[in-house]
């Protein structure tokens, strides 16, 4: 499972091990209950790893968003699955382009879930050569 963590929304994607592909799952509104919702999804999806998108600027340096994501990840450390970071460079841009190409209406939440999907697919390809 993967997360594209933002201050308003968190995109979530899951992987289907049978076909080794990541799929957008949902978007969680940041309202104070997000850690509980993420824990429930992790349990229901039997997640073994939670891949968290790791933001950096174009030079590869940490930003204010990087610090936000690191602090958010600290809240998840006790929910069970292993936590790993995966570079999320340009995932939102790529996600939006994918949605535009589908020629259907989409929301900012759809972009977040699609970005989480890209993060997870990148992780699987990097770790397992999928």
Image (cartoon, rainbow, N blue to C red):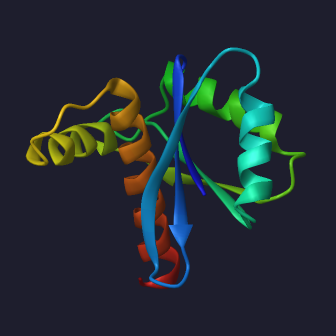
Q: Nearer the viewer, residue 72 or 64?
A: 72
77 on left or right of 124: right
Q: Residue at x 52, y 24 (%)?
A: 9
Q: Nearer the viewer, residue 6 or 43?
A: 43
The image position of residue 114, as x and y in percent, is 36, 46
Q: Residue furthest right?
A: 78
The image position of residue 100, as x and y in percent, is 12, 39
Q: Residue at x 51, y 83 (%)?
A: 128
Q: Is residue 110 visible?
A: yes
Vertical placement of residue 46 versus 105, above or below: below
Vertical placement of residue 111 versus 64, above or below: below
Location of the N terminus by quadrant is: bottom right
Location of the C terminus by quadrant is: bottom left
76 on left or right of 14: right
77 on left or right of 127: right
The image position of residue 61, as x and y in percent, is 43, 35
């Amino acid at each position: 499972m993967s997360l594209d963590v933002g201050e308003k929304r968190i995109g979530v994607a899951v992987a289907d091990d049978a076909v080794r592909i990541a799929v957008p799952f949902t978007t969680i509104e940041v309202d104070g209950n997000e850690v509980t919702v993420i824990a429930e999804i992790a349990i229901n999806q039997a997640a073994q790893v939670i891949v968290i998108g790791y933001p950096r600027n174009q030079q590869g340096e940490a930003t204010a968003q990087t610090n936000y994501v690191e602090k958010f990840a600290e809240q998840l450390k006790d929910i069970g699955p292993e936590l790993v970071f995966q570079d999320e460079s340009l995932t939102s841009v790529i996600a939006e382009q994918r949605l535009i190409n589908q020629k259907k209406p989409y929301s900012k939440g759809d972009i977040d879930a699609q970005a989480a999907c890209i993060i997870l697919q990148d992780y699987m390809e990097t770790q397992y050569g999928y």
